[in-house]
Image (cartoon, grey):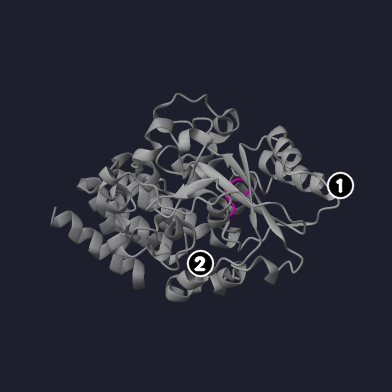
Amino acid sequence: MITKREIIDQARKLGFDDVGFTTADAFETQQKVLSERQENYAWLKEKGMDLQQGTDPKSTFPEAKSIIVLVKSYFSHSIPASLVGKFGRCYIDDDRVTRGGQYRRTKAFCDFLSENEIETKIPANLPHRLAAARAGLGTFGKNCLIYSNKVARQSSWIIVLGVVVNCEFEPDEPTLIENCPKWCKNTCLVACPTNALIGPRNIDPRKCISFLSYYGDGITPLELRAPMGMWVYGCDRCQNVCPRNEAWLAQAHPINPVVEGRAADFELTKLLHMDVDYFKKQIWPHMFYMSADEIWRWKMNVARVMGNSHDSFYIPHLEKAFCENSDERVKGMAAWALGCIGGSRALGVLNKILKESVGMPRKEIIQALEMIFNG
């Protein structure tokens, strides 16, 4: 039978940064956590992701005996300044749809195991981070993320992937602990602008900027728009402020040539005015959590970001977006953004579009006018 050493060597040869092994036993502690926080995660089950089922690998793969966990840093290159602080780093070079490097590495690894008569399954609902800690590959942060024991200077800028197999391997020593320095004083919790981190290792995903940017229903609640800041898609706030990530952030990284080559496609005005064809060709292959039917959410997010920029350059673009979109959520956010930017030009636009507006957009225009008048 193939050995752990041979599997580790092959994984590293394929480009994975670390490898660990754990049992395929049920994750009982996670079962308890999910039971206690059902309200926070009910939306995932509605979308077809049963996290409770995923806590027992044998529920989807009865022959499961071990889990091989793979680790890869997704932050080995820097990204263009125009994208920093607007798009989460883990999404910026996500090549699963285009079947790029990560897809090919994972497929090659599973093919290698198959050639050695080992069956594999990678359940999306498996608690992959918990599997990584149980395999001795990392420890937890109060922000609910996993921090590598070896990769990227022990930072959280990693992807972990649990491969469930029907072959038993000796498990590695677990590192199931929270390992934040005592002097940190809950930096990530305090820094979360939407208060999604409600306690150490306790998050309400419905308040997370990442969730709000690509899953939130309806127009973004008024009280969350300013706190969401300049994030269009995803958020790295809790990672950027974390002292455990400081060493990796301080290191110089070469620019990602792939991302650099398509950075212009994600310019805010292009996103605000994009049509379905542009979205499908330029955007969706790289950031695919929203479908073409949800292009309104992209435009709403961009309008919010423009408002939070307080840059008068965007005023004509927001006016155009209000007029060219039929979706009330885009119209409403464009009006709010104009109110945030303020000034006589924005005031003129708001008064102009108020005349023929009804419903929610009209309400947003009136609120925006009040923002300007109350200064």
Q: Residue 115: which disc?
A: 1
Q: What element carries label 2?
A: helix
Q: What element carries label 1?
A: helix
State whether residue 331 is above or below residue 229: below
Q: Closest to the observer: 26 or 34?
A: 26
Amino acid at pointer 1: Glu
Q: Is the magenta stretch mostly helix, strand or loop?
A: loop
State whether residue 156 is above or below residue 128: above
Exactly how many numbered labels are in the figure?
Answer: 2
Residue count near mark 1 (Cα–Cα under 10 Å), binned few <14, some 14–19, many ≥20: few
Q: Residue 243: which disc?
A: none
Q: Look at the image and give the residue range highlighted in magenta.
A: 284-288
141 lies left or right of 335: right
Q: Position of residue 207 (x, y in %)?
A: 37, 62
Residue 319 magenta-highlighted? no
Q: Residue at x 45, y 23 (%)?
A: 252
Q: Position of residue 40 (x, y in %)?
A: 43, 71
Upstream in sequence: badge 2 or badge 1? 2
Q: Closest to the observer: 108 or 218?
A: 108
Kindly indicate whether the residue at mark 1 contacts the one at mark 2 (C-beta within 8 angstroms): no
Residue 286 magenta-highlighted? yes
Q: Position of residue 187 (x, y in %)?
A: 29, 47
State whether residue 83 is above or below residue 188: above
Q: Position of residue 334 (x, y in %)?
A: 36, 56
Q: Closest to the observer: 135 or 108?
A: 135
Q: Which residue is denoted by mark 2 in the rendering?
A: 30
Q: Residue at x 40, y 50 (%)?
A: 141
How far, Cα to Cα, is label 2 from label 1? Answer: 33 Å
Amino acid at pointer 2: Gln
- Can see residue 91? no
